[in-house]
Image: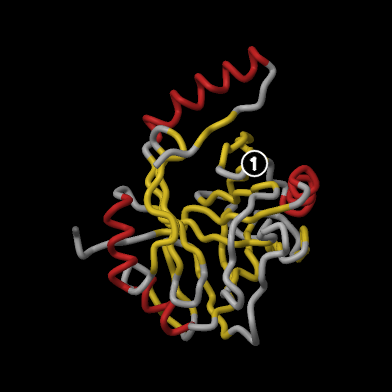
Amino acid sequence: MSDNIHLTVDSLAGNVYDLAGVLEAIHDLAGLKPFLRFELALAHGVVPVAQVMCGAVSLEFLEQARGHRPAGASHIVQVVVEVPDREPAVRELEPGLWLAVRPGPKTRVAEVEVRSSAVAEDLAVLQACGGTVKEEGVLTLGEVQVRFAPAPGAGPVADPDQSLPGWHRLGLAHPRLEEAVAALVKAGAAVVVPPYQVLPGLREAMLRLPSGLVVQPVEQKLWRMLPTIAVKGLAARLTGRPLRFKTTT
């Protein structure tokens, strides 16, 4: 494994109750539209997914996906995007899902605000994997600033149906998934879900930082992804059924 691991922010994932309503609100607020919609077959059922590109970073929304968030786990409070010629605005799209928009020279995700119960430890893990710290509590991964602040108290817990509402996952890109996972573990993160395949050319894993915040290293090979998406997309149009993928280990 190379010691020079440089992770960059690839995506931000949020769980929502009303996917159509959230997409409409994002379009009203930032002028952004989904570039891909599909269904993801998970162990607990089929989950509708939409991906909204904001520059080089994907905002991914899953409708009522289920999972486990430890009591008191740290969490993403807000995502800040820049869009040319947009007036500054902040909106809670759904409970716990805050999005802020401000004008900027190009469309991009500018900042991610995190409330952490272990700021120094979280920063140390990400700094060991390519993050740059230039001011207290602020780490840069690629062109995105991740702002850590101490959690004022226990973080949110999942509701009884474990639908994990709000922003809940930070995606980190690297061309070799196993190297990224190994580097994060060596720096102090813990594996929650080992590497798995979403579709040909797209592999992911899930880990927790010391505070409990979920990070998702991602390996993408577009030359393998695009033919699969094209074939499945054509089949979906011909049959009138939604585009669907099933994860595999």
Image height check: is 170 above or below 62? below
Image height check: is 49 above or below 207? above
Q: Compare residues 118 and 137 and report the one nearer the observer.
A: 118
Quadrant position of residue 94: bottom right
Quarter holding the N terminus is bottom left
Quarter holding the C terminus is top left
At a point 38% along the width and 30% down the height, the residue shown is 224
192 with respect to 75 (left or right):
left
Check disc 1 and report the residue beneath it: 47
Quadrant position of residue 29: bottom right
At a point 33% along the width and 51% down the height, the residue shown is 177
Q: Position of residue 158 (x, y in %)?
A: 67, 65
Quadrant position of residue 220: top left
177 with respect to 57 (left or right):
left
182 with respect to 32 (left or right):
left
At a point 51% along the width and 22% down the height, the residue shown is 230
